[in-house]
Image: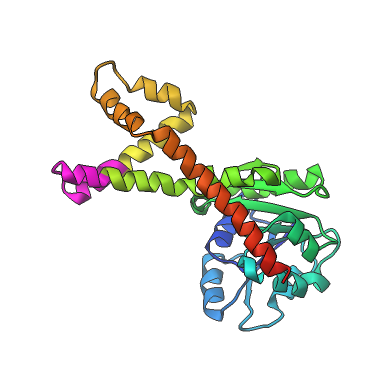
């Protein structure tokens, strides 16, 4: 039975632990937070997890990581160096470091924990309800059995996709940040409905239900082009609306958004590397 330590357990770490426990409720999970208040909330939310805080015990992180098979790091990027240096004496050489930190490169993680296999994961926010996308990028030292174990553990939080680290910026642009693109489209559609005479609450209910229905159709048949064509009658209302999107350069705009988010993730890696390496 694998043991897991979650260091610096925030909202995303909580979501992933819930997903992990849904896949195997018998796992031993130890989690830490910074404050006693957050530890209390986490313990109430995850009653089967051993939770401690740095406020209550300065060695909480080291104690949680001691003997763990997997150590999930949910701390902020600028805290990564200090956290890993503090954890080093508690880590076995076989302990797998799993970093959730956005914009912290594998090379920098390896410099901080040179004896340990390292995996970068990048979950998006729907992981909190079990419908996320989680990128999983292992270092060369991580064997296939370990990757499969992690994939199984994380599957309760959503779709797990094994990637090369170089592909993480694309995942960030499409899935990590992409959730917000759908939210922004929903905002604009609600606003358009209000301009056309609907009250805001009615417009909101319609748009939310439409997004839910469209998502379910895509889940059943993951071919967006075919789904679009199925609801686009020649000379009808849908084609008129779609043409407005195309005339406004939707494809170019979407590509630019994905590229901008991906580029920003690479910039963050450089910024965080400078902080980590002092």
Residue 57, x across and y down, in percent:
67, 83
* Residue lying at 82% horizontally and 59% vertically, measured from the top left: 116
* Residue lying at 29% horizontally and 18% vertically, measured from the top left: 233
18 is higher (above) or lower (below) than 75: above
Quadrant of the snapshot with the C terminus: bottom right
Residue 113, x across and y down, in percent:
80, 64
- The span picked out in magenta is 190-207
221 is higher (above) or lower (below) than 95: above
Count of all numbered marks drawn on residues in the image: 0
* Residue lying at 33% horizontally and 23% vertically, measured from the top left: 231
Residue 256, x across and y down, in percent:
48, 41
111 is higher (above) or lower (below) than 85: above
* Residue lying at 71% horizontally and 70% vertically, measured from the top left: 81
- Main secondary structure found in the magenta portion: helix
How is the model colour-coded?
Answer: rainbow
199 in the magenta segment: yes
Q: Nearer the viewer, residue 191 or 68?
A: 191
When asked about the image quadrant of residue 31, the answer is: bottom right
Residue 89, x across and y down, in percent:
83, 73
Residue 245 shown left or right of residue 128 in the figure: left
Quadrant of the snapshot with the N terminus: bottom right
When asked about the image quadrant of residue 208, the answer is: top left
Residue 18 shown left or right of residue 69 in the figure: left
Q: Is residue 220 visible?
A: yes
When asked about the image quadrant of residue 73, the answer is: bottom right
Q: Is residue 80 visible?
A: no
65 in the magenta segment: no
Q: Residue furthest top?
A: 234
Q: Residue furthest left?
A: 197
């Amino acid at each position: 039975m694998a043991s897991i330590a979650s260091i610096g357990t925030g909202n995303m770490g909580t979501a992933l632990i819930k997903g992990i426990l849904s896949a195997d409720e018998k796992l031993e999970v130890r989690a830490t937070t910074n404050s006693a208040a957050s530890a209390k909330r986490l313990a109430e939310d995850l009653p089967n997890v051993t939770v401690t805080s740095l406020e209550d015990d300065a060695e909480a992180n080291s104690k949680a990581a001691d003997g763990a098979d997997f150590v999930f790091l949910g701390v902020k990027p600028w805290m990564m160096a200090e956290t890993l240096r503090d954890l080093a004496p508690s880590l076995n050489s076989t302990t797998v470091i799993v970093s959730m930190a956005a914009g912290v490169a594998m090379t920098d993680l390896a410099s901080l924990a040179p004896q340990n296999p390292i995996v970068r994961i990048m979950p998006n926010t729907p992981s909190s309800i079990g419908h996320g996308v989680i990128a999983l990028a292992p270092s060369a030292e991580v064997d296939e059995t370990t990757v499969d174990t992690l994939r199984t553990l994380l599957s309760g939080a959503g779709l797990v996709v094994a990637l090369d680290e170089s592909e993480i910026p694309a995942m960030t642009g499409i899935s990590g940040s992409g959730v917000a693109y759908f939210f922004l489209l929903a905002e604009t559609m609600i606003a358009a409905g209000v301009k056309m005479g609907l009250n805001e609450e009615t417009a909101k209910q319609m748009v939310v239900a439409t997004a839910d229905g469209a998502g379910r159709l895509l889940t059943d048949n993951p071919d967006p082009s075919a789904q679009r064509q199925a609801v686009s009658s020649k000379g009808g209302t849908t084609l008129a609306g779609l043409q407005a999107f195309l005339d406004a350069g939707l494809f170019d705009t979407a590509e630019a958004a994905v590229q901008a988010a991906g580029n920003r993730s690479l910039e963050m890696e450089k910024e965080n590397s400078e902080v980590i390496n002092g």
